[in-house]
Amino acid sequence: MLKAYKYRIYPTSEQSILLAKSFGCVRWFYNYALNLTNETYKLTGKGLSRNDIINLLPSLKKEHEWLTQPPSQCLQQVALDLSSAFLNFFEKRAKYPNFKNKGHKQSIRFPQQIKLDGEYLNLPKLGKVYCKVSRLPEGKLKSVTVSLTPSGEYHAACLYDDGKDKPVSSSQGKAIGVDMGINHYAITSDGTKHGNPKYYRKHEVKLANKQKQLSRKQKGSTNRNKARIRVAKVHNKITRCREDFLHKLSRKLVDENQVIVVENLAVKNMIRNSKLAKSVSDASWGQFCTMLKYKSEWSGKIYIEVDRFYPSSKTCSNCLHQVDSLSLDVRSWQCSKCQTVHDRDINAAVNIRDEGLRLLAGGHLATASGQRVRPSKGTAFRGNVG
């Protein structure tokens, strides 16, 4: 399996200058190739292939000598990145590729001549770069992606191939349904409610003050750049706190359960609600589900997504009676048929779990690792599989 490990790196002043030049060259070549692809498509109806983009480099290096400063392999990776961006667009996994901006996150990839030796990362033309290694993984180092955040921090994402096959998914074990919320971040079918830390709300006032200071600085000045970095550091603090919470919660759910069922939420549509947009964005449900998915794949667990239109909140988990309507302010309700009193969120989590197990029992679902799973006879639909 391929696994990426992200480390903080501390380049010297000379290495920082070379990295800045490399970021600029890679960004320029990416924008040049994207613009040329768009123009070629308008004239001929066809775009440029990856080889066509790579073949542009020799003539461009003669015309622009500064393109020879970064490692040649980093420029060749632009063709791979651009072709992957178009492939994701045509397969409807992403939007149409955009031009890169200097003010956003910068990154370059080193595919060869790389080595992580102790606390130093050897990179072409850069030499040894100090790397704060938290854990040293096993396997072969395939590539290194060096990135620069808007706050001025350098990171290296090291991609390793551990040489092991993906574990075979098994349906034997505990199953759990997870319902996403705002007051409580995640509510599980066993009745556990995990609180929502709301990191953006905690730093909202501080962020607003920093942004106000930034707006008063003259464009292009040194003080404006300093104010921009202060704003970026607040954003970075929020992001790191949120990711830490999501990693710990997703790891806990994957370790304790064999089958994890969540609801396929339309987050982009929910953000259109002006009253909930900020809270929904702060929750980052999409990132949490992504973590659950790949961690389930690594651990041989089963990850299932239930259709977003499934009425999990309006259905009684005891007798399956469905009410006509249920507004968001109703947090508990009583079934008119069996008289069972339900907590809205726990009832939804139970229904999500049961619906996921029903789909799994039909044998039409693939696990997170892409393997088909069909439970044995006697599958229980109330918490355990097998």
Image (tube, grey):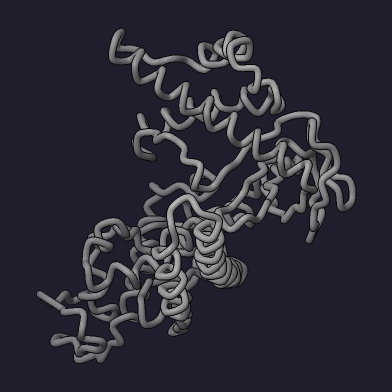
Q: Residue furthest right?
A: 118
* Residue at screen point 60% across, 17% down: 64
- 344 left or right, relative to 234: left
**Residue 38: x percent and y percent?**
35, 20
Image quadrant of residue 58?
Answer: top right
Q: Is residue 74 above or below residue 150?
A: above
* Residue at screen point 85% across, 42% down: 128
Image quadrant of residue 381?
Answer: bottom left
* Residue at screen point 28% across, 81% down: 318
> Looking at the rendering, in which quadrant would you find the N terminus?
top right
Q: Is residue 17 above or below residue 181?
A: above
Camera-side residue: 48 or 385? 48
Q: Is residue 101 above or below residue 74?
A: below
Camera-side residue: 278 or 320? 278
Camera-side residue: 154 or 188? 154
Q: Is residue 8 above or below residue 315?
A: above
**Residue 14: x percent and y percent?**
78, 42
* Residue at screen point 68% across, 53% down: 6
Residue 355 shows in this picture? yes
**Residue 379: x percent and y percent?**
45, 64
